[in-house]
Image: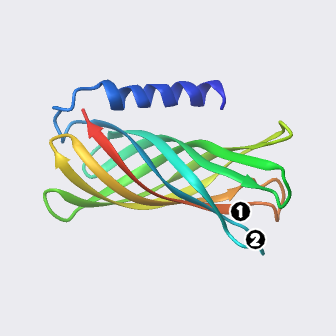
Amino acid sequence: MNKLSHHISIFILGMVFFIPMQVHANAGAYAGVSAGQATLKRQGNPDETAVGYKLFGGLHATGPFAVEVSHVNLGTYFDGTTSEREISGNALHLVGKLPFTSRLAGLAKVGVFSWDVKHSSNASTTGTDTSYGFAATYILLTGQTVRAEWENYTDVGKVDATSGNDMTLLSVGISISF
């Protein structure tokens, strides 16, 4: 993990655990953590799954929109042999919120994902591609929200016209507003 990713992760994790839970739900900023199943959609091969997680934070802009940053770990995968690849990166999304009730809302997001594929040979491949996702959120208590989310990251690992694979992350998490 590079230094910037490490510092962003520490900052977001710190906000999640050290900010008092009695905060106002409609405030401007939020932070959270989620975990679930990441899936590598291999071209011409069976899909492969791993445990993935995400640390995220956002700032409500105007109306139903927010800007969200996240550090995403999409798991470790094998290259058909014994060599491993760990896939992670940072995302920046524009998020739109559609309230269904006073506690339940839907989210849609679109943005960019700056990915890093670390190989077991200590080589690394990096790039930036698009990402998008959908979520349902439910406010538990003032400032605490549960989020179930599906995200798609396109062309992760792409170094030529045929090498990239899409990845998805299906996760459940919690966030707090402050």
Q: Kindly identify the residue that appears in the image at 58 percent across and 31 percent down.
A: 5
Q: Mark 1 points at which residue?
A: 165
Residue 31 rendering spot, x and y as whole percentages? 35, 37
Left or right of residue 176: residue 33: right
User: Front-most of 133 and 119?
Assistant: 119
The reply, left or right, for residue 113 in relation to residue 92 is right
Give the number of the disc on residue 2.
Answer: none
Q: Quadrant where the C terminus lies?
A: top left
Query: The residue under label 2 is which amino acid type?
Result: Gln
Residue name at image x 28 percent, y 39 percent: 176
In this rendered view, identify the residue nearer to me: 29 or 52. Answer: 52
Q: What SS does tag 2 mark?
A: loop
Q: What residue type is labelled 1?
A: Asn
Dot 1 falls on a residue whose secondary structure is strand
In the rendered image, residue 174, in percent from the top left (x then y), is placed at 33, 46
Say whether residue 106 is left or right of residue 159.
left
Report the residue marked by disc 2.
43
Q: Residue at x 51, y 47 (%)?
A: 53
Residues marked 1 and 2 touching at CB (< 8 Å): yes
Q: Which residue is drawn at 63% across and 44% down?
A: 88
Tell me: 107 left or right of 92: left
